[in-house]
Amino acid sequence: MFPEYRDLISQLKMEDAHFDRLFEKHNELDHKIKNMEAHIEHATHEEIETLKKQKLMIKDELYQILRKADGKA
């Protein structure tokens, strides 16, 4: 996710607790969604879609933080 911001992501994960929590939550949701889609975890289509929307909202927030930190916002 956001390879162009790899260094900035590493920096923010160490310096910004909110960013770090969001980043970890995004990764947790990604893992959970993959498990559900692979039928490792049981879920309805609606539950998966809800999680995907949550993940996308977090990704959008992460991107806004990255752009602001990079001086592009």
Image (cartoon, rainbow, N blue to C red):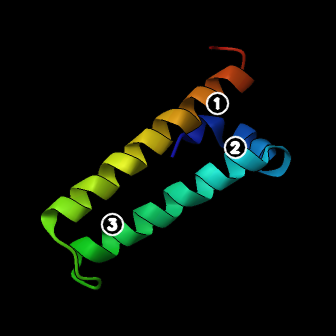
Q: x%, y% of residue 41?
A: 29, 83
Type of amino acid at the residue the image marks with label 3: Ile
Q: Amino acid at mark 2?
A: Ile
Q: Residue at x 62, y 14 (%)?
A: 73
The quadrant where residue 24 appears:
bottom right
**Up-down: is 65 above or below 43?**
above
The image quadrant of residue 3 is top right
Residue 51 image position (x, y, % from top left): 33, 57
Foreground disc of the pair 2, 1: 1
In this figure, which residue is indicated by the disc labeled 2? 9
Q: Which residue is mark 1?
A: 65
Circle nearer the N terminus (3, 1): 3
Lateral position of residue 27 relative to residue 39, left or right:
right
Q: From the viewer's perspective, is residue 26 above or below residue 67?
A: below
At label 1, the amino acid type is Ile
Count of numbered tags: 3
Mark 2 surroundings: few (<14), some (14-19) or many (≥20) residues within 10 A: many
Give the SS element for disc 1: helix
x, y percentage for residue 21?
66, 54
Query: Alpha carbon of mark 3 to alpha carbon of mark 1: how far?
Result: 24 Å
Q: Is residue 26 left or right of residue 40?
A: right
Q: Residue furthest left?
A: 45
Find the distance from the CA under tag 2 to the CA under tag 1: 10 Å
Dot 2 or dot 1: first in sequence order is 2
Question: Which of pointers 3 and 2 indicates the residue nearer the eye?
Answer: 3
- N-terminal label among 3 and 2: 2
Q: Residue 65 appears at what percent x and percent y?
A: 64, 30
